[in-house]
Amino acid sequence: MPILSFILAQAAVLGVEPLADPLEGVSSEWMLCTHPDDTAKTCHLMATFTKTAGNEYAELDHTAVVGLPGLVIELATKSVVKDGKLCSFARRKDFEGVRIVRHVEGATRQQELSAVRQLGFMYPIEGKEVCTAFYPDGQHLMTQSWINGKPVPEMATRIRWVHKDDGYVVTGWRGAITTPQ
């Protein structure tokens, strides 16, 4: 049993319940930070959520792309809070709409586009519902995810909410948006 699955199982035994609404009280001033490095004030992914209707949200993700440090992309998706979980559908059109918002010094446009194409690993889950519950863990949260209702323990992640004024940035992103021409 992976250690994180064991921890989550122990949390369930000890009575730690997931947040009833993972986006309760969240405004555009707060960002979801995955894999936070509190010393360096970096996140692998930073997401903002804007309420659109009912329990629906427009989600805007900024994430570092593995393989080209400094390359940051922007991905717009839709999410919904359902049964205490943050849920969305993996849609190819969202991934095809990715925008590069921070380029790598010295990298060619072709190298950057090639790195973005690596997002193709998401295509096998296209059209499937991905839901995530948030569990309190000190100043951070731990997540547990499901794809089409099936638990996926390897997707467990440490996250935290950070305020826009806290100084956190996406790993490899320092300075202004530098969209290549």
Image (spheres, rainbow, N blue to C red):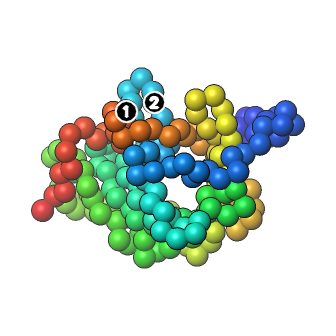
Residue lying at 24% horizontally and 50% vertically, measured from the top left = 102
Residue at which label 1 appears? 166
Q: What secondary structure is marked by label 2?
A: loop
Residue 73, given in percent of the width and then of the height, sits at: 33, 56
Q: Sequence-wise, which precedes: disc 1 or disc 2?
A: 2
**In the visual, does 8 lie left or right of 166?**
right
Residue at 43 percent across and 76 percent down: it is 93
Residue 102 sits above or below residue 131 on the image: above
Q: Secondary structure at mark 1?
A: helix
Question: Mark 1, residues whose alpha carbon is within 10 Å: few (<14), some, or many (≥20)?
Answer: few
Give the distance between the C-alpha atoms of the residues marked 1 and 2, in whole angstroms. 13 Å
Which amino acid type is shown beneath numbered disc 1?
A: Asp
Q: Residue at x 70, y 68 (%)?
A: 148
The quadrant where residue 54 appears:
bottom right
Q: Are the two marked residues, 1 and 2, in contact with CB atoms closer than 8 angstroms?
A: no
Is residue 19 or residue 64 the one in the foreground?
A: 19
Q: Amino acid at mark 2?
A: Asp
155 in relation to 52, above or below: above
Residue 118 visible in the displayed image: no
Which residue corresponds to mark 2?
37
Badge 2: few (under 14), some or many (20 or more) residues near its Cα, within 10 Å?
some
- Give coordinates of residue 161: x percent, y percent: 50, 40
Q: Is residue 29 visible?
A: yes
Q: Is 145 in front, or is 29?
A: 29
Q: Residue at x 38, y 72 (%)?
A: 96
**Percent position (x, y) of residue 76?**
40, 65
Q: Quadrant of the N terminus?
A: top right
